[in-house]
Image (cartoon, grey):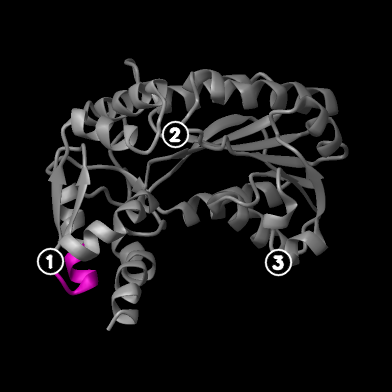
């Protein structure tokens, strides 16, 4: 039995659906079962609740051969590290109690960075706690999510620009969330691995934001430029969305760590989704389809 948390989120849903298609036995931890597609509601065991709740975990992990953990974001969290550990600690305790042999979680690239890194540091703290469970553990060390750019679709479509706090000419490691899901599925379906280690998940070649803008322009058939936001503007943008002071501090620290080189450079070319492939398959439909519907 493979246990999946956050099965209604972007990554968790992709993991659950891929494993269902492969015929794997599934148990889903979900707050609101009505948000699950009918195919999953009919196929999987469903445990209602949160994977921060020890009682829910005690039910969900019975007979589990592997578990997938993703800490859901909470922009209103009063303490970002405590938010991550609020999920990691009960999961680690329940995994230990039930003898779950394998555990896979979504974390961040750059573990071992010496300075503060905000949201990234919270993810690495999660790793430490989950490792203490004694299970074989794989930390999916993700880079900057390409899908974060989808929050700026209107800006890209209407003004031909996107905004990041990153230096336009400094490489930024990135990853398509579909690659994170695929890495998780491969590990969850494989009963042969052991030990504990990180698995970097990233685009094969790093691009600068300026290069990303050029790739966007070519994929969309219209000019797109990248603008560097000040950290004050970055903070103000997310404050307008209702983010807590702690979350704002953590996001600024993360941006500062990214500027300081928290993500190691890409090594040998890999097989992950390239930024161009992502732009053509994900960004272009998101940007161009609404415009076409309005014609």
Q: Is residue 66 left or right of residue 266?
A: right
Q: Cα distance, mark 2 to mark 1? A: 32 Å
Instruction: Describe residue 50's horizontal placement relative to residue 289 as left or right.
Output: right
How many angstroms separate mark 2 from mark 3 (CA)?
28 Å
Cβ atoms under marks 3 and 1 closer than 8 Å: no
Circle nearer the viewer, 3 or 1: 1
Residue 223: image quadrant is bottom left
Q: Which mark is residue 213?
A: none
| Residue indicated by mark 3 | 21
Residue 264 vs residue 29, the one in the foreground = 29
Residue 162 image offset from top left, x and y in percent: 21, 52
Residue that lies at the very extreme toward the bottom in this rendered image: 295
- Pointer 3 local density, CA inside 10 Å: few below 14, some 14–19, many at least 20: few
- What residue is pinned by disc 1? 223
Q: Position of residue 144 (x, y in %)?
A: 35, 42
Name above or below for residue 219 compared with residue 142.
below
Tell us which disc is closer to us: 2 or 1.
Answer: 1
In contact (CB < 8 Å): disc 2 and disc 3? no
Q: Label 2's element?
A: strand
Question: Judging from the image, what secondary structure is the residue with disc 3 in?
Answer: helix
Q: Which residue is mark 2?
A: 108
Pick whichever of labels 3 and 1 is earlier in the sequence: 3
């Amino acid at each position: 039995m493979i246990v999946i948390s956050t099965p209604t989120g972007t990554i968790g849903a992709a993991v659950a659906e891929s494993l269902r298609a492969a015929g794997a036995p599934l148990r889903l931890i979900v707050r609101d079962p009505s948000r699950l597609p009918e195919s999953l509601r009919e196929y999987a065991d469903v445990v209602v609740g949160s994977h921060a709740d020890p009682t829910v975990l005690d039910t969900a992990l019975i007979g589990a051969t592997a578990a997938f953990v993703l800490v859901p974001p909470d922009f209103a969290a009063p303490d970002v590290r405590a938010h991550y550990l609020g999920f990691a600690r009960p999961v680690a305790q329940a995994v230990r109690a039930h003898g779950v042999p394998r555990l896979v979680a979504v974390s961040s690239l750059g573990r071992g960075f010496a300075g503060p890194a905000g949201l990234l540091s919270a993810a690495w703290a999660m790793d430490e706690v989950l490792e203490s469970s004694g299970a074989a553990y794989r930390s999916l060390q993700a880079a900057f999510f390409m899908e974060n750019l989808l929050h700026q679709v209107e800006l890209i479509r209407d003004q031909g620009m996107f905004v990041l706090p990153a230096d336009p000419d400094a490489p930024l490691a990135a990853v398509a969330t579909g690659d994170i899901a695929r890495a998780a599925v491969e590990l969850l379906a494989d009963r042969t691995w052991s030990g504990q280690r990180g698995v970097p998940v990233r685009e094969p070649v790093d691009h600068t934001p300026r290069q990303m803008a050029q790739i966007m322009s070519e994929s969309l058939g219209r000019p797109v430029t990248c603008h560097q936001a000040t950290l004050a503007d970055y903070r103000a943008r997310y404050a307008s969305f209702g983010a807590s002071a702690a979350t704002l501090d953590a996001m600024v620290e993360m941006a500062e760590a990214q500027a300081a080189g928290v993500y190691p450079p890409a090594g040998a070319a890999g097989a992950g989704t390239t930024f161009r492939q992502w732009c053509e398959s994900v960004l272009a439909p998101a940007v161009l389809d609404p415009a076409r519907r309005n014609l």
